[in-house]
Image: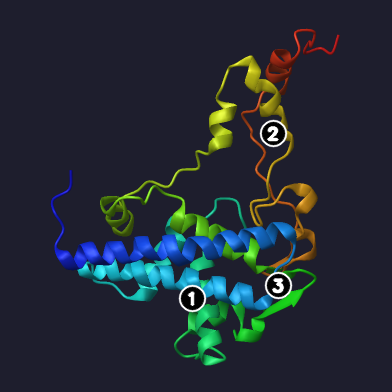
Amino acid sequence: MMTPLNPELEQACKDYSRYIEAIFGPAMTQLKTNIDAGQMELHQVFGANLFVAHAVDYIQAIRKVDGILETRKDLVRKFDQTFSVNGARFSNRKFELIDGINNALKHIRLDPKRYRQLEQQYGPISFQSLVEEKGRVLCILDGYRFDYARVVLRPAYQALTGWDLYAIDDVLEFARGGFVVSDWSQDDALMASADPADAPDQMIAYCNPNCDDCGEGEPDCYCAEFVYDGEQGQFESRFRADFDFDEVMSRISGAYRRDGN
């Protein structure tokens, strides 16, 4: 059990917990619904972007009261490093771009001196960098053209809320970085099963991976239309190297033989 928190620190944790429950969570649930329905509108994406950026502010407020001295820029960089996606081409600068787009909306365009490194990567950033097109909102920058809600906002939201943050102690541990990010997922747990009843679902999961860049299955992935760092996108998925097709098939059907006979 953690030692009792001082009132100011406890309140900062409660503020973030309430923010997730009352504002951030509902807004992002609606965002996901609109993504799935292909009905994204520009103002919705700017709103969701603001909510993600503001969640970082709440976490920094906790860390500041907790005695952790850092700039907001440092914290954003830590999030990008911690929640990067191995194998994804747009893996390590999601929170930085969210912060940039949010400030570009507030100031019409970014101060090139203050955001020199960000604009060296993406070119000039303004609120016009996001463009609504056929039920999606695209981010268009120098060398980039992609679905902003799918590629940037959805994984950022999952990174900030995909934890058990029901108790104040849990919120504080999260804000302190007291968690382990693992690639282990529900699919991994499924694949580790030797139960014959799980074999059909294992085969389905193996044959239907999601794209590392946009998070969609192959039929719904539009990455081939997009550009990432000057290169045309494509469906990017890490097929499991440890998947034993023959072994799984033999558990699905006792008649299956490796030699096909």
Q: Which residue is mark 2?
A: 206
Q: Quadrant of residue 49?
A: bottom right
The residue lying toward the viewer, choosing from 216 and 30, is 30
Which x, y percent locates residue 112? 51, 90
The residue lying toward the viewer, choosing from 119 and 66, is 66
Q: Is residue 143 visible?
A: no
Q: Earlier in the sequence, mark 3 or mark 1?
A: 1
- Residue 138, numbered circle: 3
Which amino acid, mark 2?
Answer: Tyr
Q: Earlier in the sequence, mark 2 or mark 1?
A: 1
Which amino acid, mark 3?
Answer: Leu
Q: Which residue is mark 1?
A: 99
User: Residue drawn at (57%, 91%), measured in percent from left and top?
Assistant: 108
Which x, y percent locates residue 46? 59, 77
Horizontal arrangement in the rendering, residue 187 relative to residue 199 (left or right): left
Element type at mark 3: strand
Q: Quadrant of residue 192?
A: top right
